[in-house]
Image (tube, rainbow, N blue to C red):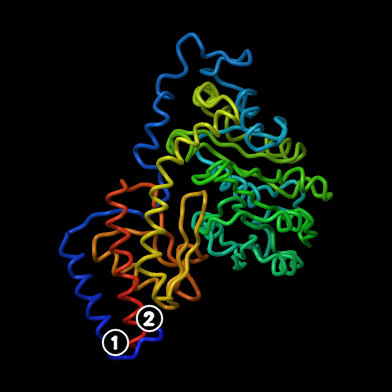
Amino acid sequence: MKLTEMPREALVRFHAEMLEEYRRCQAKGLKLDMSRGKPGKKQLDLSNALLSLPTEDACVCDGIDARNYGTMDGLPSCRAFFADVLGVKKEEVFAAGSASLTLMYGVIAKAFTHGLLHSEKPWCKLDSVKFLCPVPGYDRHFTICQSFGIEMINIPMTADGPDMDLVEEAVKDPAVKGIWCVPKYSNPEGIIYSDETIARLASLKPAASDFTIMWDNAYCVHEFAGEFIPFKDMLTECRNAGSPDMVIEFASTSKITFPGAGISCFACSEANMAYMKKLLNAECISFDKVNQLRHVQFLKDKEGVLAHMKKHAVLMKPKFDTVIELLDREIAPLGFASYHRPTGGYFVSLNTMAGCARRTHQLMKEAGVVMTNAGATFPYGKDPDDANLRIAPSFPPLAELQEAMQVLCVCLKLAAAEKLLG
């Protein structure tokens, strides 16, 4: 029987049963963590060969000694590597350090201090700066905006990506300076933007001359079920639509090799590249080229990356299967929650009964299981329905994940029963 259809007497009994189960969970004294989308130890072990690269006699690449200063935009071989993976031109790639998040923050920071290529003035001199934020979305994108005082506008996600009717209307406001996008296996819903959505994004005619699509292609090769799904090159799409400078793309090896010691890049039009390099020249002499070199030697090219990601998939799929199997068995028959069934990426997005996400999160914490904060997938941490929870299955060992998911199912049911009983 659906939870919302239970007679009150049955619901009271159900609540009592869940409360008893919950107390048993608490009595276990658990200390489990599925709060962030971090690779597990076995995934990290897949890249241990990096630790012995490069060898002493192999530090020169492209005629450049990777150990020395210079080559600010990265080793040519590393730029070519990212160009191969992303389907762009080498001249459009800037290879950098370990974190694409640092690059994203840097773009917004430079927009405020200097302005972007087509800015009339630095954003710090504007009365209002706004950004479009597809929701549920990535909390760190929202944190960047909040740190600069940027007003964030919620754009609901559909099965094809952000609601483009709302996006096209919103960009008529000249204060709207950009949109965050995770186009493949979006965080947290695992949605792949449709060709139509991508075409409409590339064809936007914003009122702001410096409107920027922040194209965070974090999960571009991260299938864990099925074969690799190709994706559109947004730089080419924007160029063909007559707005070559409207997009800056970001990617990294954070969930391919070592998150704390990977390589990252941004890709953009050559005009944008010349402008960004001029600004970056005052900031750095070069990024870690030795690490760029070892990654090129280890992964080699797109084919090598896809082969490596197959090894990740072997470890990831059983974890996602566990999450879905438990939700299917314990939650779906009760009809009060919905969830996505991703085939790639790092998260499962779950929507429980409205008004129950924070309570569920609290119950989980008190039972010894750490999750991403309820509301984190919305700007300012404010989920208007208090419904969305992000499940991150990758980090815990499978046995711990199964235990954590069993606790989550109990907490979901208990919070929903409490809500219905008032």
| Figure quadrant of the C terminus | bottom left
x, y percent for residue 277: 68, 35
Examine the image and state in which quarter residue 360 appears.
bottom left
Q: Which one is in front, 187 or 69?
A: 187
Q: Which residue is mark 2?
A: 1
The answer to whether marks 2 and 1 mark residues whose Cβ atoms lie closer than 8 Å is yes
Q: Residue at x 67, y 65 (%)?
A: 127
Q: Which residue is mark 1?
A: 10
- Mark found first going from the N terminus, 2 or 1: 2
Quick check: 94 above or below 211?
above
Across and down, in percent, residue 66 comes to 54, 18
Question: Does residue 417 lie above or below 84 as drawn?
Answer: below
Q: Residues within 10 Å of mark 2 (few under 14, many from 20)?
A: few
Q: Amino acid at mark 1?
A: Ala
Using the image as rendered, state which of residue 380 and residue 122 is in the foreground: 380
Q: Is residue 137 above or below residue 298?
A: below
Q: Position of residue 170 (x, y in %)?
A: 71, 68
